[in-house]
Image: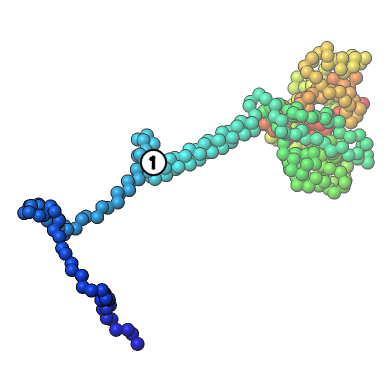
Amino acid sequence: MAETNTQPLIEQPKKETSPDLVRVFSMPEKYRHGAVVNMVEPQKASTTPVAAIQPPVPPKPVAPLPPAANKMVQPTHTKKGLLIAGIVVLIALGIGGYLLLRSSQKNKESVPAGQTQTETTTPTTPVTETPVVPETPTTPATTGTSPFPAAVTPGVDTDSDGLTDTEETIVYGTDSALPDSDTDGFLDGNEVFHGYNPNGTAPGTLVLANLAQVLVANGFHLSYPSKWSILAGESGAYEVSTTTSEIVKISSVSKEATLSLSDWYDQTVKDGTLSLSKTKKTYPLLMAKNQLTAYVDLGTMVVTLAYDTSVKTTIDYLTTFQMMINSMEVNK
């Protein structure tokens, strides 16, 4: 049980057991005989509350100085504009470089007029021996640049048999897509080079197959395509015209029998370097570098054959021209 809240008892002093004493009260000397003493009234406690002293407010942090005017942060749209401008410049540079590269490539591919073409190849007659004629074509080997004039190129030979498509379709009636039209084991161009029929096993020669005729001149004779025409000129000269405007010019001059073909050429023609070889009939032959002019030594005369392409820019009858050279021999 909780204790009752009571006031503490005042403890009474114990009564003395001694006899009663007389208490004498004396006045202080300064107050005796009517002395007046200034009485000082005690100061009353002020009731005005004293304001509490607040602690000092801490100083605010100093704000950083604003950036200089020339280092102001650029707006976002300005950055985007600069980025887009940079991309446009890069694209323009890329396009310009590409066009410059293409232009330089085209300049390299183009061949200026008057220079020799380097990518054309000279039609070569396949070297294959026939059962009847063991000799192989004596076409001068050419390497590097084309021997033909800069404005003239070899004709198209689709099946690479040594005959151009023009020779096959117009002169011999062979298949321009089939290298061996008569399937006898010999290329069409090789057979024509040696004077044989490329479109049948019999009759064997071009003359017997009526694909060629014989030109009998003063002191010699040779074969030429039946579809071509011939025109006799002065001093024993002839012009054999093709059906496509080309012309083969034939002429002859006398020569000392003891004088070699090379010496005769050095003394009379003196026109460039030629290749010395022999025809199918074993006559000495000088062939020009461009293969369009030939000199045949028949002992007491030299016969010259010149292939003139006229207005054409392709050589379409080179193998036929070589066949005419190989067919030449002295009249008996």
The residue sitting at the top extreme is: 267
Q: How many marks?
A: 1
Q: Is residue 102 left or right of residue 216?
A: left
Q: Residue 34 or 120: which is nearer the viewer?
A: 34
Q: Residue 290 or 228: which is nearer the viewer?
A: 290
Q: Residue 288 or 57: which is nearer the viewer?
A: 57
Q: Residue 202 or 192: which is nearer the viewer?
A: 192
The residue sitting at the left extreme is: 34
Q: How is the image coloured?
A: rainbow
Q: Is residue 96 left or right of residue 127?
A: left
Seen at 86% across and 17% down, the residue is 262
Q: Position of residue 183 (x, y in %)?
A: 85, 49
Q: Quadrant of residue 70?
A: top left
Seen at 62% across and 34% down, the residue is 105
Q: Position of residue 254 (x, y in %)?
A: 85, 16
Residue 247 appearing in the image: no
Above or below, 269 relative to 328: above
Q: Position of residue 135 (x, y in %)?
A: 91, 34
Residue 264 appearing in the image: yes
Name the image quarter holding the N terminus: bottom left
Seen at 76% across and 33% down, the residue is 122
Name the image quarter holding the C terminus: top right
The residue sitting at the front extreme is: 19
Q: Quadrant of residue 331?
A: top right
Seen at 87% across and 46% down, the residue is 185
Which element is circle 1 on?
Answer: loop
Q: Position of residue 293 (x, y in %)?
A: 78, 24
Q: Which residue is mark 1?
A: 73
Amino acid type of the residue that numbered disc 1 sits on in the rendered structure: Val
> Badge 1: how crowded within 10 Å, few (<14), some, or many (20+)?
few
